Image: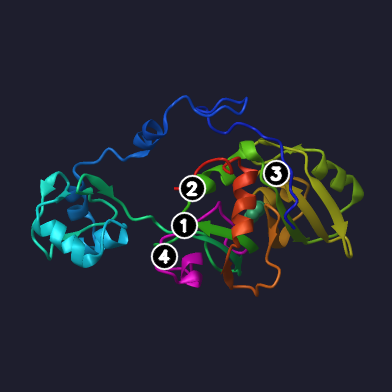
Amino acid sequence: MLNQTKPKPNPNPNRKTDGAKSTKSKPERAADKKPAAGSARESSAKTDKPTLMRLNKFLASAGIASRRKADKMIQNGEVEVNGKLVTELGFKVNPQLDKVVAAGRIAKLHRRKIYILLNKPKDAISTSSDELDRRTVMDLIGIEDRVYTVGRLDRNTTGVILLTNDGDLAHRLMHPAFGVEKEYLAELDKKMTRADLQKLKSGMRLSDTGEKVSECEAEILGDASIVWLKLHEGKNRQVHRMFWTLGYNVKKLERIAYAGLTTKGLRRGTWRYLLPEEVEHLRKLVELDGETKT
Ligand code: URA
């Protein structure tokens, strides 16, 4: 199900709405994103568990030279780390933080972008770590790379949740201006009336905070205690609060699709990497398709 077409809002004030790119050059935009920390080595020293890598391996992984050749470059005084010449062969760097320049070229590892679709079970929370040591979605995935959830699902909500280390894409998918669609099946404590369905669909004010939610699509299913709905926004506990406002309690909630991606073929609690075409679909949806992947 990859056929979503959405309005093209402008979530980024730096971008013009007529489709023109930011007036800032790419290096300027990259500079905006850089943390204003102390020197890279200082920061790496402060990190609890920095993952250090031998300099020759780092240079090889960054595509500068083979390890043997990298050793020669190091011995020949062609390599600088954070502005200081390094000639020691066993020297280690923090690939995330240290600035390495070899023969005048900046050496960088290309961080692998990861996109995961998890069929979230109940009793798993949508954060990477929990101070109360409850099961998190990261425990279910169990990979070493750090990935983050794209938005959240309540602890007992099941179904589609995406995880990625692609901050740019995640940020846009969550941005209300793109109105990425989310489909839910809600099981209620009683049968829903047609009159209430109309209220649900036509946009309403939530009784707890007075916030206005937009119109949505919804249908009563089965014995009328199950409701399918498609939202283009994601306020905190929105589905529960919409039904509470109308006098219903949600007994079970499943997100059956996010941006058209479903859990088809994935058992509850299992996950898979997104296919390249699915990543492309997401990028297109949030207008990143013309941008270079970094
Ligand atoms: N709405 C909710 O109430 N809970 C969720 O987990 C997602 C949407």
Q: Quadrant of residue 6?
A: top right
Does the segment drawn in magenta span residue 99?
Answer: no
Marks 4/1: CA distance? 29 Å
Q: Secondary structure at mark 2?
A: loop
Label 2 sits on residue: 293
Ligand 1 has an atom within 8 Å of the beta carbon of the residue at disc 1: no
Is the C-beta separation of discs 4 and 1 under 8 Å?
Answer: no
What residue does disc 4 label? 132
Q: Main secondary structure of the magenta part?
A: loop
Q: Earlier in the sequence, mark 2 or mark 4?
A: 4
- Answer with left or right where residue 28 lies relative to residue 91: right
Q: CA distance from mark 1 to mark 2?
A: 9 Å
Q: Which mark is residue 232?
A: 3
Name the amino acid, label 4.
Answer: Leu
Dots 3, 2 in contact, CB < 8 A: no
Cα distance between the residues tagged 3 and 1: 26 Å
Q: Which amino acid type corresponds to the residue marked 1 in the rendered image?
A: Lys
Marked residue nearer the N-terminal end (3 or 4): 4
Rendered position, 86 above or below 292 = below
Query: Which sits earlier in the primary sequence, circle 3 or circle 2?
Result: 3
Magenta range is 133-156
Q: Amino acid at mark 3?
A: His
